Image: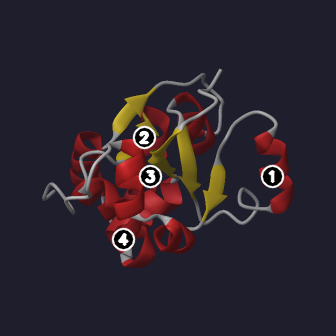
Amino acid sequence: MSDPDPNPARFVADADVLAADLLVGGPAREALNLARDHSWVTLVASDPLLDDAEAVVETCANAELAADWRDHAEELRERVDHPDGDHPGLASAYNGDAVHLLSYDDELGSVQTGASLRKHMNVSVREPRAFVSLFDPESLYEVVVGGEYPGPDREY
């Protein structure tokens, strides 16, 4: 069972968001930069989730870029396992005690799906733009780490 009080500085980016970070930029890149810039903010992802994103990058660009992206994603993410057949984004959030799942999937972000998910796990599904507008590193730092926020603490 997932931790009843997951860490608010842990998040999952679904395959569409991971690919958009590389290929499009914008809010997807801003969201992933939160993990790149702060050592205490964690991107959680399973191997199947990275497999899905790598396939999207390969389809939209090429195999070489997809493989290079995968190498960088492996370094950034905290790896979690989950049973075969589970939705990679949801399972990564559940097994990685992440509060946030970033996705462009309208069905996954629907009110009905949210109500259903709350019965099983403490996760909020939202688009990257909404996540970036709500995720405040300065106020979260005090809760997650403690003390005064020093600003971004690493360059990725």
Badge 3 marks a residue whose secondary structure is helix
Q: Earlier in the sequence, mark 4 or mark 1?
A: 4
Q: Earlier in the sequence, mark 2 or mark 4?
A: 4
Residue 9 x %, y %: 43, 48
Residue placed most toward the observer, 93 or 81: 93
Position of 140 relative to 87 (above/below):
below
Residue 44 is tagged as 2
What is the crowding at mark 4: few (fewer than 14 residues within 10 Å), some, or many (at least 20)?
Answer: some
- The label nearer to you, 1 versus 3, is 1
Q: Amino acid at mark 1?
A: Thr
In which quadrant of the rendered image does the C terminus lie?
bottom left
Q: Estimate the spatial distance between the alpha carbons at disc 3 and disc 4, rounded to whole Å.
A: 17 Å
2 and 4 marks in contact (CB < 8 Å):
no
Q: Earlier in the sequence, mark 3 or mark 4?
A: 4
Q: Quadrant of residue 151?
A: bottom left
Residue 53 is tagged as 3
Residue 40 x %, y %: 30, 45
Residue placed most toward the observer, 119 or 23: 119
> In the image as oriented, which residue stretches furthest toward the left?
155
Position of 49 relative to 28 (above/below):
above
88 relative position to 66: left or right: right
153 relative position to 8: left or right: left
Q: Amino acid at mark 2?
A: Val
In which quadrant of the rendered image does the N terminus lie?
top right
Q: Estimate the spatial distance between the alpha carbons at disc 2 and disc 3, rounded to whole Å.
A: 14 Å
Rendered residue at 44%/52% (across/down): 53
Badge 4 marks a residue whose secondary structure is helix
The residue where tag 4 is placed is: 30
> In the image as oriented, which residue stretches furthest toward the front?
147
